[in-house]
Image (cartoon, coloured by chain):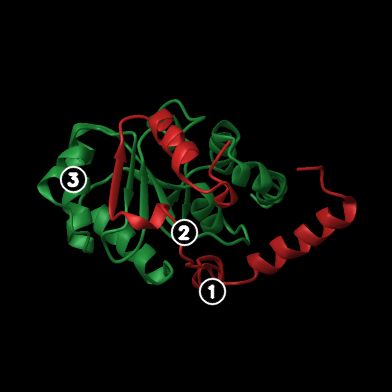
Chain colours: A green, B red
Amino acid sequence: MAAFEYRQAEEIRDVFARHGIRYLFIGKSGAILLGFPDTTQDADLFADKSAKNCSALVGALRELGFELSEEQASEILRGKDFVQLKNGPFDLDLIFAPDGIDRFDDAWARRVEVQNFPVCHPDDIIASKVAANRTKDRESLPRLRAFRDYWKSRQ
Amino acid sequence: MDEPTPAERQQWLEEFEAAARRPLEQRMKYAFIKTYKPVLDDAPFRAFDTMADYRAWCEANLPEWLGYRR
């Protein structure tokens, strides 16, 4: 599996838009879209957990080339909180209930658009990392907070 | 992690400003890398009912050095 590429982010954006999916880039991949200079391995998407959105998501993922069995599709439709996909053209984490963010609608209202990519506000990206509190989150937070302050100073 | 020193903060600021001068496509080319992550990369699909379940699975199954543990 090769690294995630810009053209694949464009494919997500365009296919998801066609399917009417409500989602946000979150985590370090979201921060990178906002301009954070760092490295990461996967794209993380925070998706609205509504039945309509999940149904559209399954179709969009298949269109993107993810090989979802009926059982796997049903897991997405049943409303799992976290789905990890490594059965497509790139690795993708689908997060339906990120730590530190109570409701999708709240994050959606605060979203930032970067070249039509919907991205979580840096405050939400930081809140989710604070709440997740893994070793890798704790290591990245000081620099991420500094970036958030820099980003806000430019708005 | 300890609080950054003023010199570190200055270095970060310079990196942020350099990144801001690059187009998004170039930033992404530098940012996304791929290396094999043991266990995590060994299944094509995983789904967890709750984030707590996912965190517990990470704690129980992933090597500590990957950084997914709390």
Question: Element at badge 2?
Answer: loop
Q: Nearer the viewer, mark 1 or mark 2?
A: 2
The image position of residue A95, as x and y in percent, is 38, 40
Residue pointed to by mark 2:
B37
Establish if A107 lies above or below B7. above
What amino acid does circle 1 point to? Gln
Chain at numbered mark 3: A
The image position of residue A122, as x and y in percent, is 58, 43
Residue pointed to by mark 1:
B26
Decide: few, some or many residues near mark 1? Use Cα within 10 Å; few <14, some 14-19, many ≥20: few
Chain at numbered mark 1: B
Q: Quadrant of residue B16?
A: bottom right
Q: Relative to residue A140, is residue A68 drawn left or right? A: left
Q: Residue furthest left?
A: A70
Q: Nearer the viewer, mark 3 or mark 2?
A: 2
Measured Cα–Cα span from mark 1 to mark 3: 34 Å
The image position of residue B58, as x and y in percent, is 46, 40
